[in-house]
Amino acid sequence: MNNRIYLDYNATTPCDQRVLDYMMPFFCENFGNPSSAHHSYGWLAKDYITDSSSVIARTLGISVDDIIYTSGATESINMILKSFSSKFELGGNHIITCKTEHKAVLDTCDFLERYEGVSMTYLDVQANGMIDLEQLKQAIRPETILVSIMHSNNETGIIQPLKKIREIIKGKGIYLFSDATQSLGKIDLEDVFSTVDFACFSAHKLYGPKGIGLVYVKNRSDSQIIRNFIQGGGQQKKIRGGTLNTPAIAGFSKAIEISYADLKKEGQHFIDMRNQLESGLLEIEESYSNSRTTERLPNTLNISFAYVDGFKLLSALSKSMAVSNGSACNSANENPSHVLLAMGLERNMAFSSIRFSLGRFTKESDIDKIIGIVGQEVAKQRSNNILWERRSL
């Protein structure tokens, strides 16, 4: 594995050694339960939770009261969306989302539609992956209570216009939720926190530990929307019961702190490497970018290679690099990417797409290697494809 170039940072990141070192004392030394209120072990653990929450809030420019810890983005998404079930009296039962959302959102919306009496509208996207704002305007009904649009797409890196969405729903009593999991640690999110009512994040996307995430609830002290999601113990103001994961929360805070310390510098470095990689890959004949828009993550590109079997290409590339053809949560699915299909790609082109996501440990010297290896493998597959030979006939 050490010989392979890792290019799947949008699926998960390695835990930064600085984060791991910061977490280690909480496993064997400062191991107390933060809910143990009668001895110093519990007091110390609670203090570390408080300190970590303060670091996260201060770094992100939010309030400590806006934070609810979860096991990750999927749980966070379930917590938020299921709070809008029709069994709760919120003045409506209609949710608007988008066809290119992560499956964690789409599957939860499907559950609400099937079993909880919620009416759903799934917005189309344009060829560049952006939602159609006019379609959003037309989709709003008197019973609409929530718009759920992800900030940045995990497969293409495309960033949706949340501020324009907010302007459309302003004054209509509609809440705005954004799955911003892919954005944290890659770009500044000040505009996101000032725009949305709810957002979710996961530590393992920014070099933190797996199994810890958070829900952002703007002005939670004033909000009665988020329901008691997990009962038992009364932790986190009775919203989510269960012993708080002190090591993971501490690791999350350190990962955020490290990422934000170098956010602009690291982001520009990603852009430079991504553009170099994209330019080189697009020199391969009949290759097309599915991420060509100015509003996208600095580390992500998605390329389709015509006349190539995507699964065979992935298999061949896996000998020298780690890439994917979409979301890790959907990798067992034999269908092409729902994101690319929604953008209007033909199935054969969606099947032949590869996502490249760069990260903190990607080397500049790797870029030319990647371009060369991909070019060789694409040419090798096309040499056995009769359609490639006849393409100009």
Image: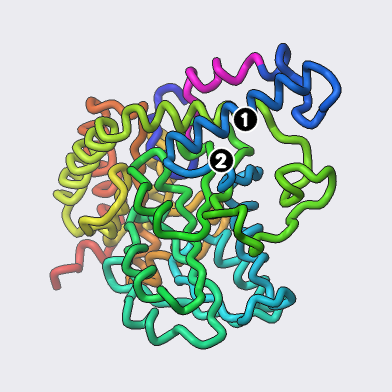
Extent of the magenta region: 13-25
The residue that appears at 55% across and 61% down in the rendered structure is: 103
Q: Amino acid at mark 2?
A: Val
Q: Residue at x 54, y 50 (%)?
A: 216
Nearer to me, 144 or 159: 144
- Does 68 appear in magenta? no
Q: Is residue 237 above or below residue 322?
A: below
- Residue 36: horizontal and vertical position, in percent? 82, 27
* Quarter holding residue 39: top right
Q: Quadrant of the C terminus?
A: bottom left
Q: Name the residue carrying label 1.
A: 50
Which residue is painted at 23% across and 62% down in the image?
388
Q: Amino acid at mark 1?
A: Thr
Counting labels gives 2
Task: Point out residue 272 in the picture as x, y percentages from the top left corner.
Answer: 19, 37
Q: Nearer the viewer, residue 359 or 285?
A: 359
Judging by the rendered image, the residue that carries numbered circle 2 is 64
Q: Position of residue 386 (x, y in %)?
A: 27, 63
- Can residue 52 be seen from the camera position used here? yes
Residue contact between numbered discs 2 and 1, judged by CB atoms under 8 Å = yes
